Amino acid sequence: MKKANGVPPCDHCRKPSAIELEYSAQNLCRKCFTRVFERRVWKANQQFKLLNRKDAIVVGVSGGKDSSALLHILAKMAKQIGFKVIPVLIDEGIHRYRNKAVKKAEEMCKKLGLRLKVFSYKKLFGKTMDEVIELRNKGKISGKACSFCGVFRRKALNQAAVELEGTKIAVGHNADDIAQTFLMNLLRAEPQRNARFGIIDEPQEGFVPRIKPLVFNTEKETAEYCMINNLPFYLGECPYSSEAFRGEVKNFLNETEGKYPGIKFNLLHSFLETKEFYENGGKKEAKSAKCGECGSPSSNALCKACGLKQMLKKL
Ligand code: SF4
Ligand code: ZN
Ligand code: ZN
C-alpha cells in the first residue's frame, strides 16, 4: 500500500517507511528496522548461546561498518546481560587504509565510553602487510595478500584476547560473509573447513572461541543500521582486496541476489542445516519416514511420485 507521497508505510507501525527488505518484501521505518536488526542479534545469541554474564568479550573492530554495528549493539546488550566489552583493533600496517579506519574506530569507542586497544602486525610478527607485499612483489615469497593477512589477523586477535583475558572474541561477520565463506569452501573443494567454522567456534586448545552475533543480518542491513544510528565508520577498501577470491564470490552472490532475492539467506540456512545434520551424526536422515503408499524412503507422508500420482488421479 502506497501513501500519497509515494512512501509506503512501515509494516510494523504504519509510519512512513525508510527501508525496504527486498527478500521479505517488508517496509520498515528507522525505529522498527533498528528493533528488527537488534532482535536478530538477540535471536542469534539465544540460538547459539553466544554471550553470558561472566564473559569478557574481545570485540574485533576495524573502523568498518560491520564492526561498528557489532560494537554498538554489544555495548547495549552488555548493559542487560552484564558481560564486559573490550574493543581491540588489529593494525595490519596498510598505508592510507588502516590509519583512516583507526580514526573511525576510535571515534566509535569514544561515543560508547570504551577504550580501544591496538595490536599491530609489525609488533607481533615483525613486518607490516605493506612490507610483506613488497617482499612478495620482489619474488622473495609467494602468495596472495589475504592469505598472509587472514592468518596473521586470526593469530593477532587470539593473542590479544589471551593477553586481555577475554573469554570470547566477537567478530563482525554478517550473513553475506558467512554465505561467502560456505560457498568458497565448496568451490575450493575444502568442505572440511565448513565443518570447522561456525557461529561459535568449537573449543580448541589455545584458541579463544570466536562468535558471530551478526549472522542473521546482511551486509546491506548492517550499513543501514550504522547510518540510521549515526555510527561512525570508514567506507574505504583495502588496496589488496582486489586479489581476493572472496571478492569474486561476493560479486557473484550480489548479482544473483539481485535476480533472486533471498538466495544469500538460503545459502546461510543451508550452511546451518548442513552443520546441524553432521553434528547430529546424520540423525535427521535416519529419522526420515517412509512413503505411506509405496514404502520408499521419504521425509513426507507420501513420496514425490506417489504425491504426484494422487494429484493426477483427482483430475
Ligand atoms: Fe587483509 Fe585482504 Fe582484508 Fe586487505 S582485504 S585487510 S589484505 S584480508
Ligand atoms: Zn515502524
Ligand atoms: Zn511412494
Image (cartoon, rainbow, N blue to C red):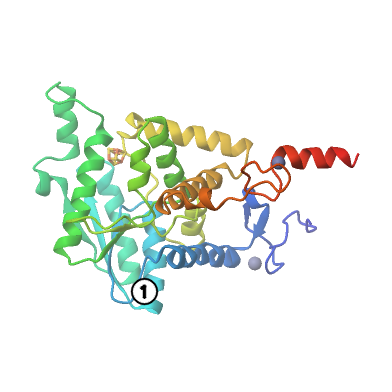
Does 107 appear above or below 272?
below
Q: Secondary structure at mark 1?
A: helix
Q: Is residue 35 left or right of residue 142?
A: right
Q: Residue at x 47, y 67 (%)?
A: 42
**Residue type, label 1:** Ala
Q: Residue at x 14, y 34 (%)?
A: 131
**Is 136 rendered above or below residue 282?**
above
The residue labelled by disc 1 is 78
Image location of residue 20, percent across then percent down: 64, 53
User: Which of 141/306 is in front?
Assistant: 306
Residue 191 picture quarter: top left
166 displayed left or right of 219: left
Question: Quarter of the picture for ligand 2?
Answer: bottom right
- In the image: residue 122, left or right of residue 172: left
Q: Nearer the viewer, residue 202 or 27?
A: 202
Q: Is residue 302 visible?
A: yes
Ligand 2 within 8 Å of disc 1? The answer is no
Rendered residue at 63%/38% (across/down): 260
Q: Quadrant of the C terminus?
A: top right
Quadrant for the N terminus in the image: bottom right
**Could you tell me residue 134's position as x and y percent?**
16, 28
Q: Residues within 10 Å of mark 1 (few under 14, many from 20)?
A: some
| Left or right of 309, for residue 42 | left
Residue drawn at (46%, 64%), measured in percent from left and top? 47
